[in-house]
Image (spheres, rainbow, N blue to C red):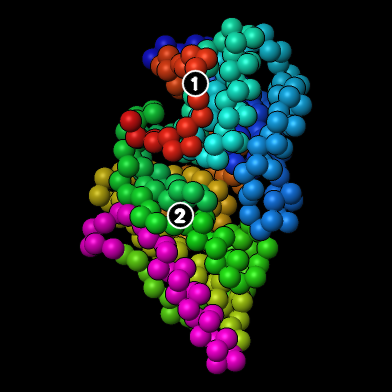
Amino acid sequence: MSHKKNSLVLGIETSCDETSVAVVKNGTKVLSNVISSQMDVHRRFGGVVPEVASRRHVERMTVIIEQALVEANVTKERLDAIAVTQGPGLVGALLIGVASAKALAYALNLPLVPVHHIAGHIYANHLVTPLEFPLVALVVSGGHTELIYMESHLHFVRLGQTRDDAAGEAFDKVARFMGLSYPGGPQIDRLSAQGKAIYDLPRAWLEPDSLDFSFSGLKSSVMQLMQKAERKGETIGQTDLAASFQAAVLDVLVEKAFRAVKQKGVNQLLLAGGVSANSGLRVRLMKRAEEEGVTLRIPPLELCTDNAAMIAAAGTYLYYEGKFADLTLNANPGLSLIE
């Protein structure tokens, strides 16, 4: 791995509804991280509308690239590489980022570095404290729930993954049943802090030593509980329901994360992905890590959600290893993290 001193990598992230461009130095120092969220646009529809997201990316991209360079106080000529999210994500949204990155790389004659979105989420932690190997990462986002083992940079082994809904997806769907506004995860988190977990909801442990997850049964149970109450003319307290649902998700996430840490005999656990902004999850993991004597790393809130700094961080290590793409690079909505 040839380390170039003072590498400057520009990252582009458009996998869903955030248009983000960042400049990162040496894979660890964020010089700028501009994020334009479309949440207000999609809230009207109760979820992300892919066509609308793509159009907004097109409108914002050039402005945001310029803004990221200005904030980083860097000229285009000083950049060493362009990193971009290749997948997974919404294909139309990804294409805008990939096309922009290709145009920049071509115009500036720079290496084009394709990055896996989840690798980015894991590397968000590296922007705070350098990763120490070996480690286990618990990745929880709208589209992913998985446990990843790493023994060196860019070396990912999947220990477990969701067999149906991702945790974030379950949060959003349950929030919709409950009549909460989009995005539902933060709303449930806020309500659950005021409620008590009094409703008996299932925890899907699966096979005895399994590190996989399943949340679709839990989602159905919430729906049945609400329908049953409605038929009987009873009301279910929103705060208690939110607390009961959140507890059911967190019990499994926390238990399986520490099961993976034990199985692999590692001392470092990372949290990554959009759901890592969940305050209940952060508190539960911190408490358990302290009990078990495990080092826990959680990214600050601004690096939990989709952002380009994390893509530039992961991209820097791919750049060091010479993992470049040519201009035929295409977006890949189903891209796998494990080669």
For label 2, the residue is: 166
Q: In the displayed structure, would residue 245 be above or below residue 8?
A: below
Q: Residues within 10 Å of mark 2 (few under 14, many from 20)?
A: many
- Say which amino acid is labelled 1: Leu
Secondary structure at numbered mark 1:
loop
Q: Residue furthest bottom?
A: 232
Q: Residue at x 50, y 75 (%)?
A: 223
Q: Residues within 10 Å of mark 1 (few under 14, many from 20)?
A: some
Q: Residue at x 61, y 77 (%)?
A: 238
Secondary structure at numbered mark 2:
loop
**Image quadrant containing the N terminus:** top left
Report x, y in % for residue 228. 51, 85
Q: Residue at x 66, y 58 (%)?
A: 46
- Residue 220 shown in magenta: yes
Name the residue nearer the viewer: 179 or 272: 179
- Residue 185 shown in magenta: no
Mark yes or no: residue 27 visible: no
Magenta span of residues: 206-234
For label 1, the residue is: 329
Q: In the displayed structure, would residue 97 be above or below residue 54?
A: above
Mark yes or no: residue 18 visible: yes
Report x, y in % for residue 160. 32, 49
Report x, y in % for residue 339. 33, 30
